[in-house]
Image: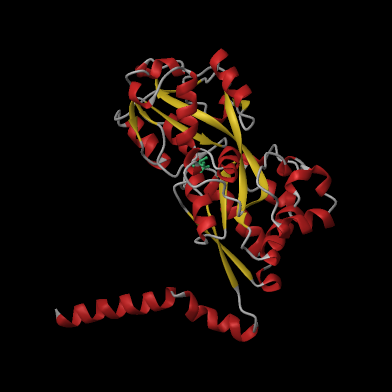
Amino acid sequence: MKRLALLALLVVFVSFGCSQQPAQESKTEDAKPSGVTYVTIGTGGVTGVYYPTGGAISRVVNQKSAEYGIKATVESTGGSVYNINAVLAGDLEFGVAQSDRQYQAYNGEAEWADRGPQKKLRAVFSVHPESITLIASAESGIKGVEDLKGKIVNIGNPGSGQLQNSKDVLEAADLTEEDIKAEYAKAVEAPGLLQDERIDAFFYTVGHPNGNIKEATSGRIKVMIVPIVGPSVDKLVNKYSYYAKSVIAISNYPTAVNDSDVESVGVKATFVTSEDVAEDVVYAITKEVFENFDEFKKLHPAYSVLTKESMLQGLSAPIHKGALKYYKEAGLDQYIKPELMM
Ligand code: GLU
């Protein structure tokens, strides 16, 4: 028995030792005296599009690890707000965040209202479009936002991008969190909760297609993607510059009960960093994404609409100087709003 315990301890010790980066690192350091800079990209839940986006960005930059001495890794997180705060605190070097959340952080609104404008936030580029996606069980009878009254609705975890979007959409329909039974679970848990009939509906601001909505629409319970439309939604889009009308292609989710594409409201996924992150690191990542654009675009179906020009739109924090250096070299700075080039 004692021997077994000792053996188990040894196994744990050895495998723990092997997983330590510094031990592996020393080899690389011998070969490259300057060492390797590790950067971490904050993403979202594993069934969303941010997680593979972090994977796609790290893939293109890690192909040139030997040249740049940069190794990017990806972390699954609670989403946009978490990522922005972690980047600002220096806990993460990069994060994926919704364009509306980038705007709010830089201007000191929503979750940042108490702390004021987050002037160290920097934009690198934007990625795929995201739609505020409302998913409901067919049985709940929810056909529009106004039907959410009295229902159990997951509006998003604190730290997510969607939490504020859900509140805005509810407010536009003259509803508050008090009018529904609000849940605050992570998006990754929502399809299971819906299929187990523990919630009637959930909000998720996300690019399409994605595994989360596939999971939600392909279970035992019949599910509908609920349109977010009407005069109140028009007002919402007119009020906030970061919201635009969007359409969710139903061909992505053939087992949903909808028979046509679903109108909604959208934002953009963006890639952000802090003023404090080194210029050469941001330059290298930006350059590798743009110089391998065709390869990058193939890494997720939500990127099918991307153009280099579109990746410079939807930003509201100043462009990081490392990224700007690349855009100037590549002649892409013509697509950037002048006020973001400081
Ligand atoms: N938009 C979501 C958020 O900011 C994440 C979506 C995703 O992971 O693809 O929390």
Residue at the image point whose x is 78% and y is 57% from the top: 326
Residue at the image point whose x is 71% and y is 72% from the top: 67
Percent of width and height locating residue 276: 61, 62
Relative vertical location of residue 12 with respect to residue 288 in this rendering, above or below: below
Relative vertical location of residue 206 with respect to residue 15 in this rendering, above or below: above
In the image, taking residue 324 as reference, residue 155 lies left or right, namely left
Q: Residue furthest left?
A: 1
Q: Residue furthest bottom?
A: 30
- The answer to whether one can see residue 165 in this image is yes
Relative vertical location of residue 250 with respect to residue 341 in this rendering, above or below: above
Q: Quadrant of residue 30?
A: bottom right
Residue at the image point whose x is 39% and y is 19% from the top: 148
Question: Which residue occupies the foreground of this view, 146 or 217?
Answer: 146
- The colour scheme applied to this rendered structure is secondary structure
- The answer to whether one can see residue 230 in this image is no
Percent of width and height locating residue 319: 70, 51
Q: Quadrant of residue 179?
A: top left
Question: Which residue occupies the foreground of this view, 321 or 26?
Answer: 321
In the image, taking residue 125 as reference, residue 135 lies left or right, namely left
Percent of width and height locating residue 305: 70, 37
Question: Which residue occupies the foreground of this view, 184 or 190?
Answer: 184
Q: Quadrant of residue 17?
A: bottom left
Question: Which residue occupies the foreground of this view, 241 or 293?
Answer: 241
Q: Residue furthest top?
A: 231
